[in-house]
Image (cartoon, rainbow, N blue to C red):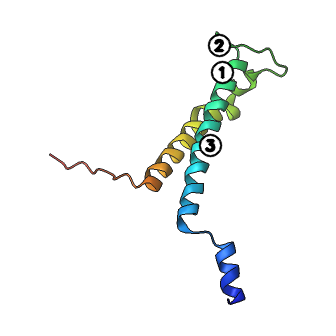
Amino acid sequence: MNATLLVVLIVVPPVTVVFGRAIIFNVLGLLDLVVAVGLGMTISPGPTQLFQLMPSGEVLTHFPLVLVPTFLVPLAVMVHVVSLRQLLGAPWRVRQPS
């Protein structure tokens, strides 16, 4: 067997493995975001606060860091969902104007 072919077979995984890894990556990314939101809720001041940490989660309520839970987390969720839809081959419906 040619050494180059052997290296290609070892280094380049089959397409199904790549898609499987991409799906796992997106599912784990969504789970990470769920854990991050839950942890953020339990350390932030308010009725859902369960842990008293120092420094507290109050720092996330001021300007530059408030963009993380209000903009970046929902954006990351949408990117993971769209990526999963495309990986799983879900059709996109286009609305016809009436």
The residue carrying pointer 3 sits among few (fewer than 14), some (14 to 19) or many (20 or more) residues within 10 Å by Cα, namely few
Q: Which residue is at the front of the view, 41 or 60?
A: 41
Q: Splitting the image into 4 quarters, where does residue 52 fall?
A: top right
Q: Is residue 31 above or below residue 39?
A: below
The type of residue carrying mark 1 is: Met
Q: Residue furthest left?
A: 98
Q: Splitting the image into 4 quarters, where does residue 47 fall?
A: top right
Reading the chain from its start, which is encountered first: label 3 or label 1? 3
Q: How far is the residue under mark 3 from the one under mark 2?
A: 25 Å
> Which secondary structure lies at badge 1?
helix
Mark 1 highlights which residue? 41
Residue 80 location (% of width, % of height): 53, 46
Q: Which mark is residue 21?
A: none
Q: From the image, which quarter does the C terminus lie in? A: top left
The answer to whether residue 82 shows anywhere in this view is: yes
The type of residue carrying mark 2 is: Thr
Q: Which mark is residue 48?
A: 2
Q: From the image, which quarter does the N terminus lie in? A: bottom right
- Residue at 37%, 51% (x, y): give it: 90
